[in-house]
Image (spheres, rainbow, N blue to C red):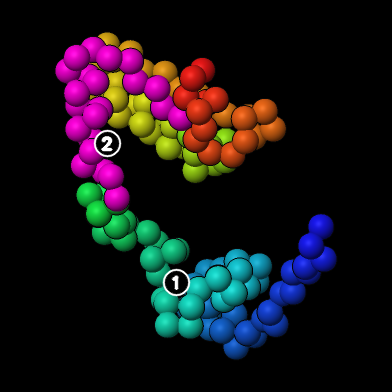
Amino acid sequence: MTGARWVRAPADLARIARLQADHPLSATAATVLAARLADDVAPGAWLEPTLEHLHPSDAMKGMAAAVDLVRWSLRDRKKIRIITDYDVDGTTSSLILQAAVRLVDPSADVSYHIPSRFGEGYGFSKVAAEK
């Protein structure tokens, strides 16, 4: 243990009240948003997200190479193994990727692995890749 302690910043009661006045939010939801969002960020994108709020996927580092690899794997009938984290975004992305690959090629040889954080650690690892 490092001895570090989490200290919660005091709630901005005026901002919480404004959020509740402008949006149908519970006190808890308004408190969380007030604490999480920067002062100049409007909560609309959080409360009513649209596809326009997403960042362009091709801006992600390595995306073009990853797409090329998946295309090559599908064309040459190679196995595709999806490895993600055990948390909610990892599990969700695993399902989305599997569905997308099967949508492009229903006969694709696609499988997945979600590592145990206790036995394999967190995130991608050589152990997970070799399974």
Place of residue 101 in the rendered image (x, y in percent of width and height, measured from the top left): 29, 25
Q: Earlier in the sequence, mark 2 or mark 1?
A: 1
- Which residue appears at 27% of the width and 14% of the height? 78
Place of residue 8 in the rendered image (x, y in percent of width and height, measured from the top left): 71, 74
Picture disc at residue 32 = none
Q: Indicate yes or no whether the magenta region holds residue 67.
A: yes
* Label 2 Cα neighbours within 10 Å, binned few <14 / some 14-19 / many ≥20: few
> Mark 2 highlights which residue?
66
- Which residue appears at 17% of the width and 18% of the height? 75
Segment tinted magenta in the rendering: 61-83
Residue at disc 2, secondary structure: helix
Task: Say above or below: 107 vs 50.
Answer: above
73 or 31: nearer the viewer: 73
> Mark 1 highlights which residue?
43
* Label 1 Cα neighbours within 10 Å, binned few <14 / some 14-19 / many ≥20: some
- Which residue appears at 55% of the width and 71% of the height? 36
Place of residue 107 in the rendered image (x, y in percent of width and height, measured from the top left): 27, 11
Task: Say above or below: 41 vs 80.
Answer: below
- Which residue appears at 59% of the width and 80% of the height? 16
Three-letter code for the amino acid on which mark 2 is drawn: Ala
Query: Which quadrant would residue 33 be assigned to in this image?
Result: bottom right
Residue 30 visible, this angle? no
Using the numbered discs, state the Cα–Cα distance from disc 2 to disc 1 in whole angstroms.
33 Å
